[in-house]
Image: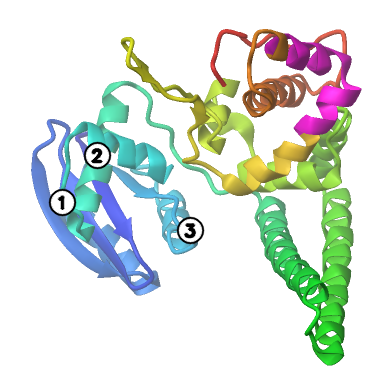
Amino acid sequence: MANVFVGVDVSKAELVCRILDEKGRELGQETFRNGSAGFRKFKKFLLSLDPEGRFFVSMEATGVYYRNFARFIFHSNDRFVPGVFNPASVKAFAQSRLSRTKTDGQDALIIARYALDLFRDDAFRPWEPERAEVAQLRQLVARREQLVETRTAAQNRLQALKEDGDSLDFVIESVEKEYAHLDEQVREIDRKISAHMDRHEGLKKDKELLTSIPGIGTTTAASWLAHLGDLSQFDKPSQIVAHIGIAPRERQSGSSVRGRPQICRTGIKELRKALYLPVVATTRCNPAMKAFYQRLLARGKQKKVALIACMNKLIHIIWAILKSRKPFDPGRVPPVPETQPA
């Protein structure tokens, strides 16, 4: 059975496909409508290319438009293997190949080549759809993030109006009502999120494990579970660190380049934001994390750099707890190398 690698650039309207064989030779390219009829034509087309082939159909996890197509591939027979990749990983691969062209067809070709490289390295991970309750939790968390952002904007407007001596009372009152309404909506969706997790045994147990860590509450636990879901897609916590986008990036070369260390922000910014305040809390109420933080400061690390290192360590703790299925134990905090620049 021959292996065929299909890269698909997914947009709202179309599926642009480029197809490679196991040796990396192009077998063709086609475009289909993004919808059930287009999915069936896509499948028929691939089978016409190789009736006995095994098809690795890969795409990027961008927006929501890929999801129905990925589910279609997953529920096809076992000769169709879906792959869903982090766009940042695909972009880095394209840069490593010195790709300069940016078209839908070229993007599809890069995805196909990336999938082929992963397969050759025995690193291709078939995608599986998340559980329905996790997908619903993601919707709730995404809506909460939107409401909080809008509420913050209203709060900033209100503060600016109150500091401006020429502001009309009517305008101030209007923005105050807007802020109060948004604040109530945030509280309401917090109740919905908590109730949703409590209704589903798996989410409830995961929430209890996560909130056993000092500094992590229901909101942070929900954000983690919504954005990452099942940890089976990761082999080690450093992969989660990279996926979220807090892997260290240091700019240093020879004696002349001494850039400040930064984090690689190509990841899930919402989860980075959700983890920041819990990390600050753990450096105060978690003895092991507090000692780690103080050691970094004593070695001359800036506070922000030390906090990023603590966030990295917190992810290792979360990984250990969810894998062991045991609540947080301050006497069993997993080690994290302190030599990283964070």
Give left or right: position of 259 versus 242: left
Q: CA distance from mark 1 to mark 3?
A: 26 Å
The magenta stretch spans residue 187: no
Tell me residue 113's x, y (percent).
22, 38
Tell me residue 20's x, y (percent).
16, 42
Question: What's the mark number on residue 69?
Answer: none
Q: Is residue 47 visible?
A: no
For the N terminus, the image quarter is: top left
Q: Are marks 1 and 3 in contact (CB under 8 Å)?
A: no
SS of the residue under disc 1 = loop
Which residue range is magenta in the image? 279-296
The magenta stretch spans residue 292: yes
Give left or right: position of 310 versus 93: right
- Dot 2 corresponds to which residue? 94
SS of the residue under disc 3 = helix
Q: Residue at x 10, y 47 (%)?
A: 27
- Dot 3 corresponds to which residue? 67
Q: Dot 3: few (<14), some (14–19), or many (≥20) neighbours within 10 Å? A: some
Looking at the picture, tell me which residue is in the foreground, 261 or 168.
168
Q: CA distance from mark 2 to mark 1?
A: 10 Å
Query: Which is in the foreground here, disc 3 or disc 2?
Result: 2
Q: Is residue 54 above or below residue 174?
A: above
Give left or right: position of 322 versus 122: right
Looking at the picture, tell me which residue is in the foreground, 324 or 91.
91
Q: Is residue 91 above or below residue 241?
A: below
- Dot 1 corresponds to which residue? 101
